[in-house]
Amino acid sequence: MTLLFLINPLIAFCIGILLSFLLRKLNARIQSRRGPVVRIPPAWRDINRTKILQPLYDILKLFSKNTFIPEKASPLFIIAPVMALLCAILASFFVPVAGISFDYTFGLVVLFYLLMGEILCVIVGGITSGSLFAVIGGVREIELLLTNEIPFILGTFALAISYNTLSINEMMGFNLISNPFAAVVVFLSILVKLHIKPFDISDAESEIVSGLTTEYSGKLLGILEVTKVMMIFVLVALFADLFLWVPSSGLMAWLVFFSGVGFTSVLIALVHSLFGRFKIDQATWWLLRVPLVLSVFAVVWASMWRYVL
Amino acid sequence: MSLSGAFLKKSPWVYHAHAGGCNGCDLEILASFGPRYDLERLGIKLVASPRFADILLVTGPVPLHTKPFLERIYDQTPSPKKVVAMGACGCSGGVFVDDENYSIAGPVEKIIPVDVRIPGCPPKPEAIVEGIMKAVRMF
């Protein structure tokens, strides 16, 4: 094993910025708006030439602003975003980028805990701010986490059953055909984890002022934005690795990987712009009805192929 | 121009502070973020909380009971910030300009420092875009 996986967080950050630009742009185009423009008209050239790196500008701006820390907040208010970023960076080690990753025998299990840990850190940070909006957001986030985690784990374990391994590198392949139910389930869980439109209940801007991040400003909000950008890449790459990967090497591997990532992110952007927001009871009930049943089906399907046929 | 100014210019986030307006201005703000005058072309975003904001877009003549909230919103905005007063009421008090008016705390500039004024009742979306761009170039 080489140490090449150490550049994974860097790739995750760079590609994550492009992916979140793609999400914003596609969302705007579907609403028949322009979105952040690629070529700025001459009258506004003094500000900027292109807006492709818009999410990066957002992050840099947030880091150059003042930070408010509420009087009632505990030290966890500052520690939690850093912990969340740490979890995201560690998670990016375990997700193969064109086959390069920290290939650990139980990588999948570690990845579960890191992905869960990132969300829990954000929840802890938000709740310790003492804002009621953040507490409501935290409660909603926990409800989503509880109902979403089971289908996610069952969906990925279906692949673990059919490949008889818990290492992510060994279960990569074009599993979209061999186990489509698992693909659907994991895709839906990714939507919930990234707060894509039908499931952005916990940071509903219009009702509870961005939920958990209400009290964050300046540099701490910047850290949370970096985490969000990295999580987009980590989860999209995980889906592309598990379900859209064709075994290959060299330049071909990068091509296959990035086309998978592009396809997945376009799909996510379409879902984001085409749906409205669930109510929390609708979302939890729907998550229990559809993805949970599908995930059980995926596990049965995988074990049937492996042990019966 | 400082380093933070260079970044602030590239992604100004706008918070719409409603201080007792009649909703005419608010509709025009929505129009300027809609398909025709889309301000997101320049990376400008409407945000939900003043803590995320760089530009405060204040509409309305500021009634007495709204004054403390407006002051608090101004204090809650982190520091490189600009204030844009919008509409006839926001700029000068509009039809509420009379000094003997018992319920109006005055135009926005009496309460918080204002950088850009956008006149009009309501201002056209073109005017809003121009005003926000003026505030952005001040960073």
Image (cartoon, coloured by chain):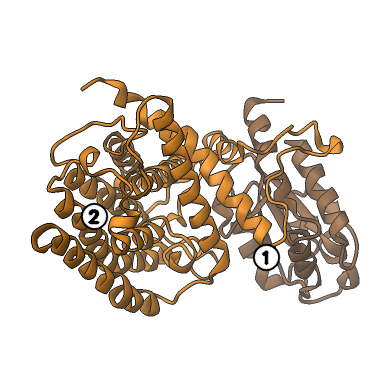
Chain colours: A orange, B brown
In the visual, does A33 lie left or right of A102?
right
Mark linked to residue A137: none
Judging by the rendered image, the residue that carries numbered circle 2 is: A156
Q: Secondary structure at mark 2?
A: helix
Q: Residue at x 36, y 33 (%)?
A: A98
User: What chain is tagged by disc 2?
Assistant: A
The front one of A183 and A220 is: A183
Query: Where residue A53 sits: x, y (%)?
Result: 60, 36
Rendering quarter of residue A252: top left
Q: Residue at x 56, y 36 (%)?
A: A56
Vertical side of A237 occupied by A142: above or below: below
Query: Where residue A13 sits: x, y (%)?
Result: 45, 35
Residue B76 shows up from this direction: no
Residue B117 shows up from this direction: yes
Quadrant (top left, top right, bottom left, bottom right) of the C terminus of chain A: bottom left
Query: Where residue B97 sits: x, y (%)?
Result: 89, 68
Q: Residue at x 87, y 67 (%)?
A: B122
Q: Secondary structure at mark 1?
A: helix
Query: Where residue B99 sits: x, y (%)?
Result: 87, 69
Judging by the rendered image, the residue that carries numbered circle 1 is: B67
User: What chain is tagged by disc 1?
Assistant: B
Q: How many marks?
A: 2
The front one of B57 and A47 is: A47
Q: Residues within 10 Å of mark 2 (few under 14, many from 20)?
A: many
Q: Amino acid at mark 1?
A: Lys
The answer to whether the residues at label 2 and label 1 have Cβ atoms under 8 Å apart is no
In the visual, does A128 lie left or right of A12?
left
Quadrant (top left, top right, bottom left, bottom right) of the N terminus of chain A: top left
